[in-house]
Amino acid sequence: MRIIDWKNFTSGICSKKPLALSIGVFDGVHRGHQVLIRRIFSAGSRPAVITFRQNPLKLLKPALYKGDIFSLRQKLAAFQSLGVGLTVLIDFSVEFSKMMGKDFIDALIRNNRVESIALGVNFRCGRGLDTGVQEFCSLTEKDGIKILAVEPVMAGTSPVSSSRIREAVSGGNLAEASELLGRNVEIDLSGLPANVSFRGDSAYFLYDARNSGRVVPPSGNYRARTQGVEAVVSVENGIITVPESIGRKGFGDEKIEFLAA
């Protein structure tokens, strides 16, 4: 999978082959996201995703930002596993947030051969969220671009959403979170401050996720797996304690998978 930034993409660096796009934050790449992304797979078009290095909510409404389900590394790995051929990363900023939706669409298609764009039916973008699916249809019609409006995936009576998953994880309902994700809850341990603690003859690796911006379960003991080995890990106020038996390869290069009950 090729990864480029927004500036390079809008310059037309990928203009040689027709593209089928989807756009979104895609935090957690949950079941709804997976359905949306699979809609961009069409004969002759390169499947591409437009997303963000950081969740825009962190800048726009920090009081509402509850953390990320996935690190960027996890998100990119999920895209690749789904068969996405190109990921475009936007560095969201105050300046970018002032862009009107019509200008975003113009930048998106001006120098690229976009054949189709898959969007969730509730998708909105642009300054003041001024542009939704209807505006995408009207603003791309002259270019012959097909807009695919994708209905949300339901779980119970409510749509699958990143917000629901964050609430489930932070509330300790990992079974619900796993159902919504379509996989077990995973936390990327890379880049987290880490230390070693000894208790008797046993060593434990302590990963500090308190200031990481990652959603973690509440304090408690959990069945978990990393590097193919299962054990009980503990979480205490955002600090994840991993026994040496599953953390023996060292710091920073693995993820912890919480096994749903």
Image (cartoon, rainbow, N blue to C red):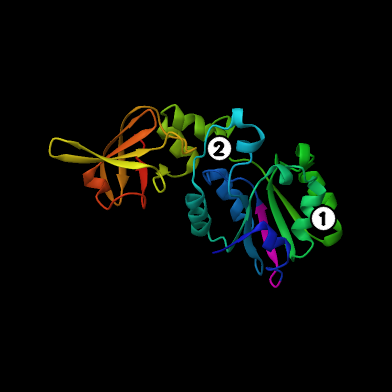
Quarter residue 199 falls in: top left
Q: Amino acid at mark 2?
A: Ser
Looking at the rendered image, the quarter that the N terminus falls into is bottom right
- Crowdedness near tag 2: few (<14), some (14–19) or many (≥20) residues, C-alpha within 10 Å: many
Q: Position of residue 75 (x, y in %)?
A: 51, 50
Quarter residue 61 falls in: top right
> Which type of secondary structure does the marked residue at label 1 adopt?
helix
Q: Magenta residues, as a range?
A: 16-22
The residue located at (52%, 54%) in the rendering is 76
Tag on residue 162?
2
Decide whether residue 208 is among the magenta residues: no
Q: Position of residue 74 (x, y in %)?
A: 47, 50
Q: Amino acid at mark 1?
A: Thr
Between 243 and 119, which is closer to the camera in this rendering?
243
The residue located at (13%, 35%) in the rendering is 200
Which residue corresponds to mark 1? 140
Between 13 and 20, which is closer to the camera in this rendering?
13
- The answer to whether any part of residue 216 appears in the image is yes
The residue located at (75%, 38%) in the rendering is 129
- Crowdedness near tag 1: few (<14), some (14–19) or many (≥20) residues, C-alpha within 10 Å: some
Looking at the rendered image, the quarter that the C terminus falls into is top left
Decide whether residue 19 is among the magenta residues: yes
